[in-house]
Amino acid sequence: ETGVTQTPRHLVMGMTNKKSLKCEQHLGHNAMYWYKQSAKKPLELMFVYSLEERVENNSVPSRFSPECPNSSHLFLHLHTLQPEDSALYLCASSQSDRRTDTQYFGPGTRLTVL
Amino acid sequence: QKEVEQNSGPLSVPEGAIASLNCTYSDRGSQSFFWYRQYSGKSPELIMSIYSNGDKEDGRFTAQLNKASQYVSLLIRDSQPSDSATYLCAVEGNNRLAFGKGNQVVVIP
C-alpha cells in the first residue's frame, strides 16, 4: 500500500460525459501530481500542485481541469474528452515539489473514452 | 532528441541470470536519476536513486551512473520471476523530471 489512493480504478465514459477522478494521499506530503500514461509512451506530467497552488501546467487541453482543495486531495475533472485521451491516469505525491524528492504513485485510473 | 531513452523491446533473462538495463539522457545538467519498477496493471514504485558517478548497490539491484557519457544503468543480479516488470528510468534536471518509455523484463523460470 503506497499511501496514495485513487478512485475510480476504472472508468468508461462517452465523449459528452463529465466525470471526475479523485486522488488522496495519506503521507503528509505538500506536492501532488497528475500524470498520463499511454501505451508505448513515457509518463507525461500534466499538472503539479504545491501547497494547494498549481505550480505547473504542461500544455494540457482545457477539457482536463484540476482541482486541489487541500494538500491531501487532488481531483481531475473531465469533460468532452476524445478517444485519444484513453490512458492510465496516475496521481503522485512528494514531500515538496522539488523533482529530486521521491514521488509516490497511486494505483491509477484506467480511463476509456468511447 | 528524446530526453530519456531506454532500449526498446522486452528483455528475457533466465532465472538466476543478470538483467542489464540502460538509459541515456540528453540534458547534460541532470543531477538526479531514478529507476522505477512497474508491474503490469500497477503503479510505478521507486527502487533506486543515484546522484553521483559510480555504482550504488541495494540488495540485488545495482545502479551505475556515468555523467560524462550521459547514461545510467540498472543491473538485477540473480533475477527472479518476481522481477518480471517494466522498469522506468527517470532523470531530473532544472527541476523537471523526465521519464523514459520503460524496459520490460521477463524472467524465465
Image: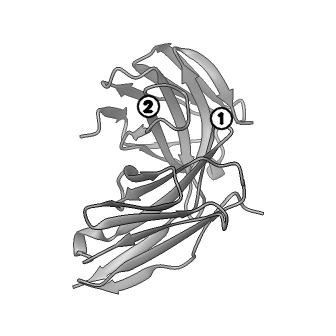
Q: Earlier in the sequence, mark 2 or mark 1?
A: 1
Chain letter for mark 1: A
Judge left or right: residue A107 versus residue B89. left
Residue A97, percent from left and from top: 54, 27
For marks 2 and 1, give the one nearer the viewer: 2
Q: What label does residue A102 carry, if any?
A: none
Camera-nearest residue between A112 and B72:
B72
Q: Which residue is mark 2?
A: A93
Q: Amino acid at mark 2?
A: Ser
Characterize the local packing of mark 1: few (<14), some (14-19) or many (20 or more) Cα atoms within 10 angstroms: some
Judge left or right: residue B49 versus residue B57. right
Instruction: Please tell me whether residue A33 is drawn above or below residue A105 in the rendered image.
Output: above
Q: Which residue is mark 1?
A: A80
Q: Amino acid at mark 1?
A: Thr
Chain letter for mark 2: A
Answer yes or no: are tags 2 and 1 on the same subunit. Answer: yes
Identified at 23% across, 75% down, the residue is B80
Q: CA distance from mark 2 to mark 1?
A: 27 Å
Q: Quadrant of the N terminus of chain B?
A: bottom right
Q: Kindly indicate the quadrant of the structure image that contains residue B85.
A: bottom left
Residue A50, percent from left and from top: 54, 20
Identified at 23% across, 40% down, the residue is A1
| Helix, strand or loop for disc 1 | loop
Judge left or right: residue B41 versus residue A46. left
Marks 2,1: beta carbons within 8 A: no
Camera-nearest residue between A61 and A105:
A105
Q: Quadrant of the C terminus of chain B?
A: bottom left
